[in-house]
Image: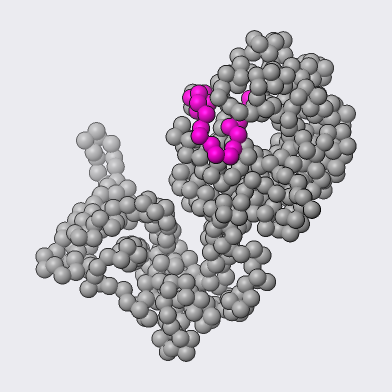
Amino acid sequence: MSKERLYLFDTTLRDGAQTTGVDFSLEDKRRISALLDDLGLDYVEGGYPGANDTDTEFFKSKPAFKTARFTAFGMIKRAGRSAANDPGLNALLGSAADSICLVAKSWDYHVRVALGISNEENLAGIAESIRAVVASGREAMLDCEHFFDGYKGNRDYALAVAKTALDAGARWVVLCDTNGGTLPHEVERIVGEVVAHVPGGNLGIHTHNDTDNAVANTLAAVRQGCRQIQGTLNGLGERCGNANMTSIIPTLLLKKDFAERFETGITPERLRTLTHASRVLDELLNEAPNRHAPYVGESAFATKAGIHASAILKDPETYEHVPPEAVGNQRRLLVSKQAGRSNVMASLETLGITADKDDPRVQALLDEVKARESSGYAYESAEASFELLARRHLARVPHYFSVDSFRVMVERRHNASGDLVTVSEATVKVYINGDQDPLWSVGEGNGPINALDRALRKDLGRYQKHIESIELVDYKVRILTGGTEAVTRVLVETLDHATGKRWLTVGVSPNIIDASFEALIDSINYKLLKDGAAGE
């Protein structure tokens, strides 16, 4: 039985750019578009040529895509102008795009109030604009803005917009839930009615996530006939985001109801790069990955309950809804005070540490983990600190350096410009393994922990080359007990720019500086261990 083809249309570089705090540079667009093409998507929408300098420059030449069609986005011609005399439309036609996706009003209320023209004028503008794209030799498509709201308000006119685009030569007519307010049962009903007028093979779906239903709405539309799917990597987009491709793609490929009926351009090999693609995008945006994201999050296949961990090891297929390796992720059986020996054994196996389950050192490790977590540590988050602890019990962690002393000073003073500023300065005295003389380092930062981090990593002698690419990228503090004897837990996240890998370490102390320093020391030791640096 042959499968129906689904076409994946990514709008990260246009819809994603509307995310609060996101501003793609030209180089960002080039790197991300290559990433999306490598994933195997059918369309990569690069932006709106003519709308800004970055997008205009991006569309001057076509990227060397292997599979994707380079797609430009823009509006239909303005009312009162011909297609030939519309600057916006001509910017699209003059671009290097393979395909052009135009957007038009499909809600008669917006035609009347926002555009101030008649319904007929809007339809004429759609037809003329689509014909102009087709005449240029490009693939044409129309995003029907606010289609579902328009359909509820004036069914016949919303359908007329869709049919007008199709009759003018549009390859795709895309039904847009622009304000994200439509629910899955409504999408299913409306798309089921639309396919009686526009063939499903020409229909696309574009949903926003304002009710947290964008993925569900997209899948409902596919079930009812839509064959083009629009969305963004990691669900980027204005307000609450767009349909998340990192959830949609593996659902289509790995879930039986869809996998048996449909096929995409994404192979199993490419699917295994999905988690990597998701995290590369986060890295380019300087964003911490969503640990709880379906399929690609670090916690997507994690458990810390001992009874579940034991069951997962025996029968992973019934305890995990898909194999984590299928999307390039991995199983994480976390060690915590709720964990049993199964978690510890699974974690040791992942770390490559060989130990018999009856080895008394395993029980000793578990006992220490539980004792430490009772005093404030949290190893289910700080896996790098756990690995160091486990190797010290069951394998070996070389001794690289020791900190003899450190001092942190915070001073509020007037700078040379007369402005009142607060300056943090840290001094660290370090002995490198095998050296008799200490290394003294001084660092300044925008806070005492930043200063301490800079001082510690400023000069580690022979180990400096290993730590030049790492950076402290996140810092979390939690006060665990109140009063004058308060216990503080600090979690530090470190990024290795050379590999893109991140890890977390933990420190606990009544003194926030001591807790932070413990986590920083663990972070550096972890990096040296992973690099195989020679130690004592």
Range of magenta residues: 56-74
> Can I make out residue 211 in this image?
no
Q: State the image coordinates of residue 25 (x, y, percent, origin top left).
A: 46, 33
Where residue 408 sits: x, y (%)? 25, 57
Tell me: residue 122, above or below residue 405: above
Using the rendered view, name the quadrant where residue 319 is placed. Answer: bottom right
Q: Compared to 304, does 158 lie above or below? A: above
Q: Which residue lies most toward the front here? A: 1
Indicate yes or no whether the magenta region holds residue 68: yes
x and y percent of residue 426 in the render?
24, 55
Residue drawn at (58%, 27%), measured in percent from left and top?
97
Looking at the rendered image, the quarter that the C terminus falls into is bottom left
Q: Does the magenta stretch include residue 214?
A: no
Residue 236 placement: quadrant: top right
Q: How many labels does the image show?
A: 0
Q: Is residue 507 or residue 291 the one in the foreground?
A: 291
Does residue 144 appear to the left or right of 304 in the view shown? right
State the image coordinates of residue 369 (x, y, percent, origin top left).
44, 78
Q: Is 128 drawn above or below residue 408 in the view shown?
A: above
Q: In this view, does 533 lie above or below 127?
A: below
Whether residue 71 appears in this view of the structure is yes
The type of colouring in the image is one colour
Residue shown at the point (83%, 33%) measured from the top left: 198
* Furthest-left residue in this view: 437
User: Image quarter for residue 511?
Assistant: bottom left
Q: Residue at x 66, y 50 (%)?
A: 248
Residue drawn at 48 percent across, 48 percent down: 280
Q: Is residue 199 left or right of residue 17?
A: right
